[in-house]
Image (cartoon, rainbow, N blue to C red):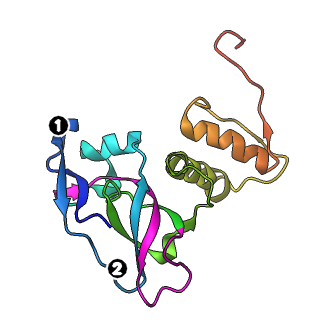
Amino acid sequence: MSAVNHAVQLFEYGGPECLRVVDLPIPTPGSGEVRVRVLASSVNYTETLLRQHLYPQTAAYKLPFVMGYDVVGEIDEVHPDVVQFKVGDRVADMTVVGSDATYRLLKAKDLTIVPQGIDPAEAATLILSWTTAYQMLHRSAKVKPGQRILVHGAGGAVGQALLSLARIAALRPGELRTASTRG
């Protein structure tokens, strides 16, 4: 284990110049928690909003705090009351903040296993966009097989996830129309 916990903290709201790499204590898991050695944490547009104090979910957070919306890590310590995970498991979580660090604590109830052989950096890029797309289809729209959907902005990360998840859910894509084919 590294002797330090390097982390990217936001010290004031604004641009990237408001971020600093700091050394923090290595945390110890409490009840229901595991500690992971972070393998990957993606950087996404939502963090730009968060950094500029424009993200409602974190508006009440007090500065400084560690950035990092999502994480893929390898468990290196487990609290004794956690039985569903063990040291060495690779896991993922959508944390909103706190994952741009060498080590971090995670609640075991929020974790998803990341299979061996999956690149941690690639897995981290899927967490926010694919969870958002899944929730749009199944929690908000409550889609049923055979329904037709329209994906506006299909070129972005969430749009691409929507297209893939729509195929899995047996949805029918709408007609592809561009500005030049509109009538």
Left or right: residue 175 versus residue 3 is right
Name the residue located 14 percent from the left edge and 47 percent from the top edge. Answer: 12
Q: Residue 78 lies in magenta, yes or no?
A: yes
The vertical placement of 121 against 74, above or below, is: above
Residue picked out by circle 1: 17
Residue in the foreground of this view, choosing between 109 and 62: 109
Which quarter of the figure has residue 172?
A: top right
Whether residue 107 is visible to the viewer of this picture, yes or no, is yes
For badge 2, the amino acid type reads Pro
Left or right: residue 145 versus residue 47 is right
Indicate which disc residue 132 carries.
Answer: none
Image quadrant occupied by the N terminus: bottom left
Which segment is the magenta one? 63-89
For badge 1, the amino acid type reads Glu
Crowd class of label 2 (few under 14; some 14 to 19; many from 20; radius 10 Å): some
Left or right: residue 8 versus residue 90 is left
Image spot of residue 163 (x, y percent): 69, 39
Question: Which of the two discs, 1 and 2, labels the residue nearer the N terminus?
Answer: 1
